[in-house]
Image (spheres, rainbow, N blue to C red):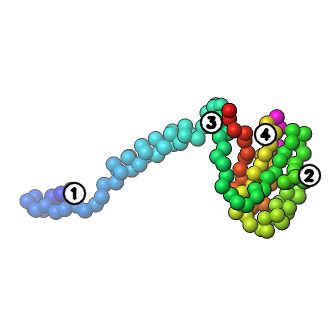
Amino acid sequence: MAFSFDSKNSKKRRIVSDINITPFVDVLLVLLIIFMVAAPMMTSSINIDLPKGAATPSNEKIQPISISVKSDGSIFLQDESIKLATIPSRLLQITGNNLSNKIYVRADKNLDYGRVMEVVRIVSVAGFNQVVLATELAQ
């Protein structure tokens, strides 16, 4: 709160109710700069070695739906060979349009990572949001 003196009578003071926002703007600009510098550090990629998968036993009573990709790139839905383009329609048929089912993707470890991600993308585009990448237990 600030006071100002009346020019006619110097003994009378009146309260100036204007807000001084200059310090507020200064603080906001400093915070903006801090976040602009810190944000890229939080999202930058760090070279790490990913651990082997540690799976927990599944207690599901429903038979899992699995898509297997062999090292030669061939794709199998359950135990039958399938083409990449027909995966969405076949999955919807098997699940009865239930998009909450988990879809397990099993891929050979020598397979190109891009091929695995193609399969995951196709499953996601079909509307299934619970895609699980299967791994072997670490020994």
* Image spot of residue 103 (x, y percent): 75, 55
Type of amino acid under label 4: Tyr
Tally the marks.
4
Measured along the vertical axis of the image, is residue 21 above or below residue 33? below
State the CA–CA distance, disc 3 to disc 1. 49 Å
Along the polypeptide, which appears first: circle 1 or circle 2?
1
State the CA–CA distance, disc 4 to disc 2. 20 Å
Q: Secondary structure at mark 4?
A: helix
* Front-most of residues 93 and 119: 93
Q: Secondary structure at mark 2?
A: strand
State the CA–CA distance, disc 2 to disc 3. 37 Å
Along the polypeptide, which appears first: circle 3 or circle 4?
3
Q: Classify 10 Å Cα crowding around label 4: few (below 14), some (14-19), many (20 and above).
A: few
Residue 45, which numbered label? 3
Q: Residue at label 2?
A: 81
Residue 1, which numbered label? 1
Residue 113, which numbered label? 4
Specify whether residue 95 is painted magenta. no
The residue at the far bottom in this view is 96
**Residue depicted at x 28% and y 60%:** 18
Q: Classify 10 Å Cα crowding around label 1: few (below 14), some (14-19), many (20 and above).
A: few
* Front-most of residues 34 and 106: 106
Type of amino acid under label 3: Ser
Q: Find out whether the residues at labels 1 and 2 contact each other: C-beta distance under 8 Å.
A: no
* Image spot of residue 100 (x, y percent): 70, 63
Along the polypeptide, which appears first: circle 2 or circle 3?
3
